[in-house]
Amino acid sequence: MILMKQILFALILLAVTACTPTPALPTATSTTIPSVTPLADTATPLPTATRTVTRTPTVTRTPTITRTPTITLTPTFDFPKVVVNVAAAHCRYGPNQAYLHAADLYLGDRGEVRERWYLNGWLRVRFDKLSYHCWVAPGAVEVTGDLNKVIVLNQIDLTRVGTNQYGPPQGLTASRQGNEVTISWNQMVMTEDKDRGYFIDIFVCQNGGYIWWPVSFPNQFTTSYTVTDEPGCAQPSGGVIYTVEKHGYSQPETIPWP
């Protein structure tokens, strides 16, 4: 019985298999292999990186280049030279014998002329042996060089000569009798070692000429002075007075000319 069932099952299975169509084998076709395209010799540029935004620096102006002028050497002025031609002479703080003594000069002393006085030809000289300038009479020196090229002075600031601890004379007056003018002032009391008297610096008219008239007094005890002053000059007469001590001159005091 069992055997019959097995035979029957095998027959049914065979029948079912026979009814199922056999799948067709795929037709062999030639597949075209794509050709490899050779790479070009030029490199493909890489993608450009996006630039990071940075702060723009402030624009600094570039200075314009200018040509530097060539330095032209200025010739040094050759001051006239002097040599003392007398045995001994004075060098003074002004261009006249009435001014304070500044230094002793001796035969052979040398220096350079820096200025000259417009009225009498005195020379303001820097002597080699001195550290300052002083005035010397033209007759006491021999000059080498052209004096016409030096500066001509027409005024002097005597207050720059040292220091003066006394003021100008007080009680200053002036009176006239005809052509005579008398100048008077009070005594300025000074110690004996410092006392150098007074200095008057005036212009007067004499014989139709306008004359520079400097005069000094040796000590404090002279307190008046009389000078001739005539009519006939276009310029006015007059001037100033100083107290003088060994260190220098006071401020000037104007004389009330009559």
Image (cartoon, rainbow, N blue to C red):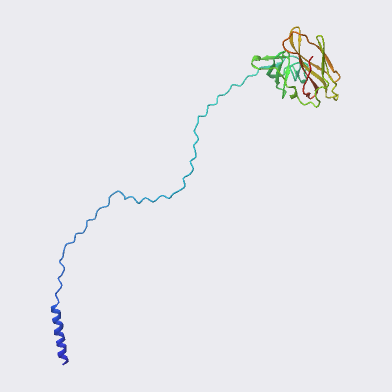
Residue furthest out toward the top: 207
Q: Quadrant of residue 20?
A: bottom left
Q: In which quadrant is the N terminus drawn? A: bottom left
Name the residue: 15% across, 80% down.
Answer: 16
Asked if 63 appears above or below 114 in the picture, the reply is: below
Q: Quadrant of residue 120?
A: top right
Q: Nearer the viewer, residue 58 or 35?
A: 58
Q: Residue 56: where, in percent of width, then height? A: 46, 45
Q: In the displayed structure, does residue 258 sit left or right of residue 16?
A: right
Q: In which quadrant is the C terminus drawn? A: top right
Q: In the displayed structure, does residue 155 sit left or right of residue 192?
A: left
Asked if 251 appears above or below 147 in the picture, the reply is: below
Q: Residue 157: where, in percent of width, then height? A: 73, 22
Name the residue: 15% across, 79% down.
Answer: 17
Q: Residue 226: where, in percent of width, then height? A: 82, 13
Number of labels in the image equals 0
